[in-house]
Image (tube, grey):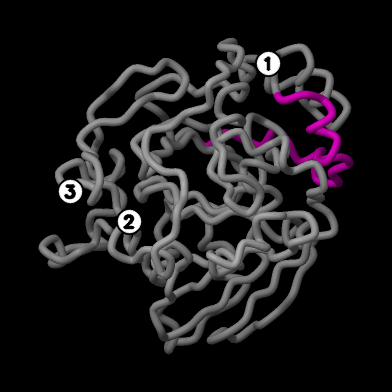
Amino acid sequence: MLVQRRRGWELPEAAATPETTYLNRRHLLGAGAGLAAAAALGEPAAAQRLTDLPDPSAALYPARANPRYTLDRPLTPEAKSSTVNNYYEFSYAKNVAPAMSRFQRRPWRVAIDGLVEKPQELDIDDLLKKVQLEERLYRHRCVEGWSMAIPWTGFPLSALLELARPTAAAKFVKMEAFRDPKVAANQRDFRYPWPYVEGVTLKEAQNELAFLVTGAYGKPALGQFGAPLRLALPWKYGFKSIKGIVRFTFTDTQPVSFWEEVQGAEYGFWANVNPKVPHPRWSQASEEDIATGARRPTLLYNGYGEYVAGLYTGREDQQIWY
């Protein structure tokens, strides 16, 4: 199904405040402090933040930083990264926050089902009690050719696998986002196969880099980042990192992802970053830093080859990029 949609290198016209909001993150404890800092440091307007309050998990932040995951570039200021987001449920523009005024992160239920020994449904805050949060600094590469660097807080996807205990028959993990057209107006758009669905192989899900995100910049994540639960797969293009997750289904069948169903010739199941494999409509050889506008060469697997290249040994000549 071919649809009309905004794509490519398009960025918001308004420039966000270039000052970093991250230097004082250790002081951003609790919802009230986070809101005050937002006004002082140029984050999205307080009125937009109110939809994220109160958050019963606020006391869990900031989490311990994991020194294993570092960056080769400066962090992107939150004032910038929070205004350049693809979240089609709410908006086709990059500045998604204004369209999220009715979105609430609580209550939020997460189902685990399919080929598992322990199917269950958990409140997000009960899930957080079963895992250990940590902070990781990850690069993020959008398929459209722009990039950012984010301090995510969350827990390894492998920790959720331990809770689920997939059976020997499970080969894939299918993830499903929320569906509520009353708060996400674009879910009324019949051109798209809502809800948003993504999937990975079980081996990819077990990889140490696969990370379930609950926070960013030392506090609970803003709604436009995919709160209260999103995926971060830093070696893949960003559309694989599904936002607003409500279900994990373990299956023996390769899932058909949202963009694969919309336009499979351009957005397939794998979506591994490779500068030598162009998107059908543009090069992937370089990327634009959204904070500075500077261009840098794109790295194979977004620079995470030492962690993930072994997942694809013997498949290099296959279509594992799109």
Dot 2 falls on a residue whose secondary structure is loop
Q: Which residues are magenta?
A: 44-66
Write down the quadrant of residue 58 in the picture: top right
Q: Residue at x 72, y 41 (%)?
A: 99
Q: Is residue 47 left or right of residue 309?
A: right
Mark 3 nearby-residue class (10 Å; few <14, some 14–19, many ≥20): some
Decide which of tag 1 and tag 3 comes sooner along the chain: 1
Residue 75, image x and y in percent?
A: 49, 23
Distance from Cα at disc 1 to Cα at disc 3: 40 Å
Task: Give the quadrant of the C terminus.
Answer: bottom left
Residue 63, image x and y in percent?
A: 66, 37
Q: Which residue is mark 3?
A: 277
Dot 1 falls on a residue whose secondary structure is loop
Q: Residue at x 77, y 66 (%)?
A: 109
How many marks can you see? 3
Q: Nearer the viewer, residue 299 or 321?
A: 321
Distance from Cα at disc 2 to Cα at disc 1: 35 Å
Write down the quadrant of residue 95 in the picture: top right
Mark 2 nearby-residue class (10 Å; few <14, some 14–19, many ≥20): many
Labels 1, 3: front one: 3
- Residue type highlighted by circle 3: Val
Q: Nearer the viewer, residue 41 or 92?
A: 92
Q: Which residue is mark 1?
A: 24
Which mark is drawn over residue 260?
Answer: none
Visible in this render: residue 85? yes
* Residue 57 is a magenta residue: yes
- Residue type highlighted by circle 2: Ala
